[in-house]
Image (cartoon, helix red, strand yellow):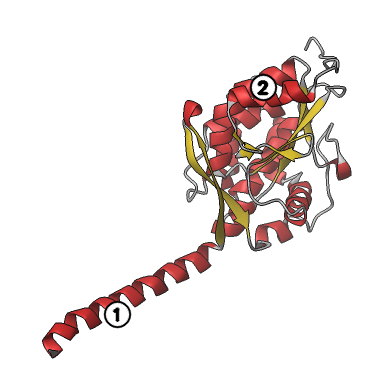
Amino acid sequence: MSENQEPKRAARERLAQQREQDRARDRRRRTLIVSAAVVGVLALAAVVGLVAIDVGESGRDSEAAPVVTPSGATGKDGLAIQVGADDAPSTLTIWEDFRCPVCAQFENAFRDTIADLAHNGQIKVEYHLATIIDGNLGGSGSLRAANAAACAQDLGKFPAYHDVLYRNQPAENDDAFAKNSKLIDLAGEVKGLDTSAFRTCVDDGTHDSWVGKSDRAFRDGGFQGTPTALLNGESIFPKKGDEEISAENIKKWVADANKGKKPGTVSSS
């Protein structure tokens, strides 16, 4: 009888140990899984958003110095980097973290669709930058990449550099973007960006405090994760109402929102 019970007791102990290990791992990561979206036609299957549970030391440190707002930043407190016409009839607001793998999936799946809508004056896109992966996993790659993107904005190169960062995003647990040399190397893929002004801005962390302020606005805004995508204030990721996000649905949602409205004035540049 005791021999029959012994294997059961050992199995229960192993199970209890495994559960404790799982709980410890969850506490270390401080990460809450909040959403999953299936986007079959664009191979964005079963993606997961991450939430910043903790403030994160990087967020505090980056707000210590005076805030230097990137050239042309708009919106409340100058925390948005706009792409598209000022008078576009609809606004797509996107909160992102350059280390966030789901953000890269979102961008790589919908980049062309969003760019076409902005180019045709249908939307203006307001990008907001967050650093939740630094807070969740440690490191400073989210902050360093966001600062570099703001430096690119100073030179009018934000859209192209933004896309380069997501196309070259390292694995989530690889803090490669923490190296300014890596960010400067990637600037070589954007014509006219790798300049002394850009390098100085990156190395000096010119916009670190601005990034910290943006990250605090993200956490104080009650958003559930990155990416957060809002069309005229209404969430469209991972879905809008009962409709899953897709390139075709984005176009349809924008068309519906713009009925009876003129496209924005798009500059020839």
Neighbours of disc 1 within 10 Å: few (<14), some (14-19), many (20+): few
Q: Is residue 138 visible?
A: no
The location of residue 55, given as percent across then percent down, is 68, 62
Q: Quadrant of residue 165?
A: top right
Mark 2 residue element? helix
Q: Viewed as shown, does residue 55 lie left or right of 165?
A: right
Eye-nearest disc, 2 or 1: 2
The vertical placement of 260 against 44, above or below, is: above
The location of residue 166, given as percent across then percent down, is 57, 34
At 35% from the left edge and 77% from the top edge, which residue is drawn? Answer: 16
Q: Amino acid under label 1?
A: Glu
Residue placed most toward the observer, 229 or 254 = 254
Q: Viewed as shown, does residue 67 lie left or right of 105?
A: right
The vertical placement of 60 against 155, above or below, is: below
Residue placed most toward the observer, 260 or 161 = 260
Residue occupying the far front of the picture? 242
Q: Quadrant of the C terminus?
A: top right
At 48% from the left edge and 48% from the top edge, which residue is drawn? Answer: 174
Q: Quadrant of residue 82?
A: top right
Mark 1 residue element? helix
Separation of residues labelled 2 and 1 (CA atoms): 54 Å
The location of residue 93, given as percent across then percent down, is 75, 36
Identify the mark at residue 13; answer none if there is no mark: 1
Neighbours of disc 2 within 10 Å: few (<14), some (14-19), many (20+): some
Q: Is residue 263 visible?
A: yes
At 75% from the left edge and 23% from the top edge, which residue is drawn? Answer: 256
Q: Which is more N-terminal, label 1 or label 2?
A: 1
Q: Amino acid under label 2?
A: Lys
The location of residue 245, given as percent across then percent down, is 60, 32
The vertical placement of 73 against 173, above or below, is: above
Q: Which residue is mark 2?
A: 251
Identify the mark at residue 108; answer none if there is no mark: none
